[in-house]
Amino acid sequence: MIKAVNQSRSLNIKILYSVLISLLMSVILFFAITGLGRLAVEKIYMSPDAVSSRKAEIYSQLNNYVIQNSVKGGDTAALANWTGDNRFITILIYNKNGDIIMRASDGEAQSALNMLTFERMQYAVEYGKLYPMRFSDGVYNVAIGDNTSEKELWLNIAAAGALAIVCFFLLILWHVRKLTERIIKLSREAVAIGEGDLEGPIDISSNDELGMLAKEVDNMRNSVIERMGNEKRAWEANSELITAISHDIRTPMTSLIGYLELLSSSDFADIEKDRQFCSSAYAKATELKELTDELFKYFLVFGRSELDMKLEPYDARMLIEQLLAESEFDLMDNGFKINHISFDGEYNINADPLYLKRVLDNLVSNIKKYADKKMSVAFICSYENGLLSVCASNSVKKDISRVESTKIGIRTCEKIMQSMHGSFKITKDEDHFAAEFSLPAEKKE
């Protein structure tokens, strides 16, 4: 399950930050370009030499127009038409007395009669130097106003705006590309996992939603690895078990078949010998049954992840003593001497009596097979640190012809005690064997 992401690190916030930063960078770029452009216009384009050079060129163009079209000094229509074709240029016409007679700009012309006095004075100061020019009706003085810097400034603003917009979208596309690269990389890693490549780690480089998703995919990868490892170990354990059981079953099965062949070929004349063969065959059949029972027990217990237990509260002394009494009676009936040490105090335990009896049955079966009847079997009950323990200890007989190879009984006891929230452990050497199981217990008030 993917956990909630810190809002300050979520993709939505990161995208918002990206948009704001891109916008800020674009605005800074816009003002930087317009500022540099304005400075270039002021310092370079509008320098005295550049202005003088452009005015000389404008004068030449206007003079050619006047000569080619026989323009008179007061021909407002002709001069208005010329300024219409040459935007951002203003023309003032002066007579011989130095008085303004006309102003033409942006395709319009205005005679002096329509100008106020302060306008005529303003224009005379603003456009400065007068250039003599011969019109068809005489020589007039011309003042030239160069406003093409406005065009340059507008072009600068347009270029700055276009570059700022391009910069904004490039920054956004860069962020989107980084995001899509992470998504593509994560998808490739997920596809690799799906194809069985579990060794390559998942890149977890952030704490946003994609980072959390990558973390969950990596957790899934680790879970698959762990599960496959558990399955492999289980397969190896089962293979070892089947190999061991097959070996153990094959031995009594071979002997059983041999005795049956002897019986089938006998003429039953020697009754005593036939009885011996039957007794031996019966013993091997019993041994074979015990092995198959152990195998069934193994799959019954270890074939499930959880046992179907019914844990209920019991009086510890009553339950333990009753189960031990049955086990001790069984052992004494088979010729064993019992040394029983009980615990002090009254306690309650949660247990399933049927499964607890199975643990004791396994211990009793183990004692019957391997314990030395010349020595006492000890059952020691004790309570310490919230745990009620029962320890079964015996001496191992010296003439054991077959040792337990599968350890099924021990594994069964471990599984049962774990399911009852307890524990099971064994200690052994060449001469002694001890098995102890423990359960949580509460002292009665």
Image (spheres, rainbow, N blue to C red):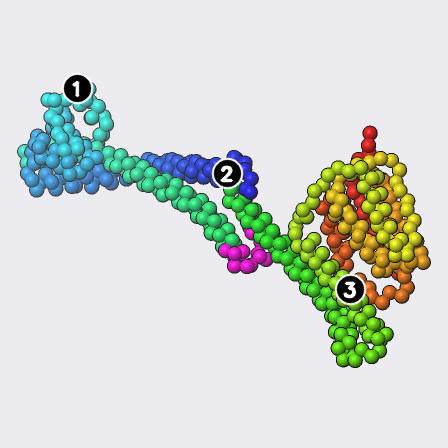
Q: Residue 260's spot in the image, x, y percent?
A: 76, 74
Residue 204 is left or right of residue 104, and the answer is right
Instruction: Name the image quarter holding residue 35.
Output: top left
Nearer to us of marks 3 and 1 is 3
Give the SS element for disc 2.
loop
Residue 252 or 213: which is nearer the viewer? 252
Quarter of the image that includes the N terminus: top right
Q: Are marks 3 and 1 in contact (CB under 8 Å)?
A: no
Residue 204 is left or right of residue 61, and the answer is right
307 in relation to 81, above or below: below
Which amino acid, by three-letter code, is at mark 2? Answer: Ser
Secondary structure, magenta segment, majority class: loop
Instruction: Find disc 3 in the rendering and name its residue.
Output: 286
Q: Residue 440's spot in the image, x, y percent?
A: 78, 40
Q: CA distance from mark 2 to mark 3?
A: 70 Å
First in residue order: circle 2 vs circle 3: 2
Instruction: Find disc 1 in the rendering and name its residue.
Output: 117
Classed neighbour count for the residue bearing mark 3: other residues with Cα under 10 Å, few (<14), some (14–19), many (≥20): few
Residue located 10% across and 22% down the image: 113
Residue 425 or 273: which is nearer the viewer? 273
Instruction: Name the image quarter holding residue 139.
Output: top left
Q: Residue 31's spot in the image, x, y percent?
A: 38, 35
First in residue order: circle 3 vs circle 1: 1
Residue located 82% across and 29% down the image: 445
Residue 337 is left or right of residue 152, and the answer is right
Instruction: Find disc 2 in the rendering and name its residue.
Output: 10
What segment carries the magenta color?
191-206
Which amino acid, by three-letter code, is at mark 3? Answer: Thr
Q: CA distance from mark 2 to mark 1?
A: 69 Å
Residue located 57% across and 50% down the image: 220
Which amino acid, by three-letter code, is at mark 1? Answer: Thr
